[in-house]
Amino acid sequence: MHKHTIAMEHYASGSYLRRCSALVKMVCSITVLVLCLCFDCIAVSLWIILSMGAVTVIWGRVRPGDYLRCMGIPLVFLLCSGIGLLLTVRDAMQALQVTLRALASVSALYFLVLTTSVGGILSVLRRCHVPKLLTELMYLMYRYIFLLTDVCRTMYMAACGRLGYRDYRTALRTFGGVGSNLLVISMKRAEACYRAMESRCYTGELRFLEREGRGRWKEWAYMALYTGSIAAVWRFCR
């Protein structure tokens, strides 16, 4: 995987928190998300943004630059939405609350995806009796998104090496060529990936190495302590 690819699985596999129970992390992320939506308070949103970011960077061992780059993608969209909301409702405080609440929700979800592998998430969904077809489609869609991204990046770098973007006219021609070849090459890569799955005894069901257990009591205690801190911030600042 290219070093500039923003791939969640890459960060999750190198995270120190990958050893923690996926069930605990998922419950924690969902609980924080629900509390963020229920507690209409700027202080709560700021606390979730800062604390989730600190846990992901310090304990999750995600480099700060990579984390900020990941957060920058939804941040631009949320800022544009906040400006639009401000122009609509003419209430700066309400626009700020909505924007921070949405950003806090994103940080809670990023905590989950940057510290938990897709296999761990799917394992929890299976134990929650989510239909097998749905979980397999989720994994395949996730996998092929980055497959297409990798193919597009490779073609772009090859075009840059041949001066395909030296001027505007040439860039338009190169862009059209890349777009026309992307589907063909990505289908070939997808076929090669399917053959690799068949060579590993694929019979129509995706299997992952799963950890049994529902998490240690210390992990649940840390989760309860953190969610309690959110309630304490809301109680103190409301």
Image (cartoon, rainbow, N blue to C red):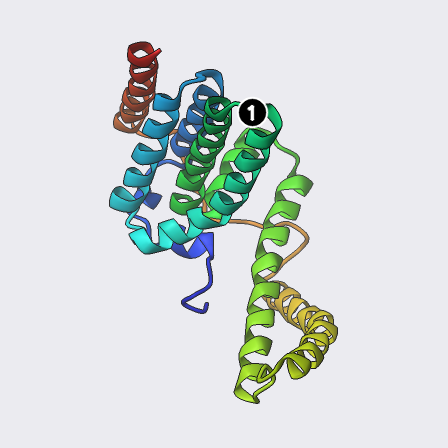
x, y percentage for residue 104? 43, 32
Along the line of sight, the residue nearer the viewer: 122 or 173? 173
Residue occupying image coordinates x 40% and y 28%: 28
Position of 108 relative to 5 (above/below) = above
Specify whether 195 is left or right of 22: right
Question: Residue 134 versus residue 51: which sits nearer the camera?
Answer: 51
Helix, strand or loop for disc 1: loop
Which quadrant: the C terminus?
top left
Query: Could you tell me how many numbered marks the image carries?
Result: 1
Q: Quadrant of residue 14?
A: bottom left
User: Residue, x 30% and y 17% (percent of image)?
Assistant: 233
Instruction: Tell me the crowding category of disc 1: few under 14, some 14 to 19, or many 20 or more residues within 10 angstroms, Cα based.
Output: few
Residue furthest to the bottom in view is 162
Q: How far across and how far down the image is residue 89, in percent?
A: 59, 24
Instruction: Please state the horizontal and vertical placement of residue 154, each as a whole percent of the image.
Output: 55, 76
The residue at 39%/30% (across/down) is 24
Q: Disc 1 designates what residue?
A: 90
Q: Is residue 13 visible?
A: no
Q: Is residue 67 left or right of residue 2?
A: left
Res. 169 in view: yes
Instruction: Give the residue drawn at x 53%, y 79%.
Output: 157
Q: Amino acid at mark 1?
A: Arg
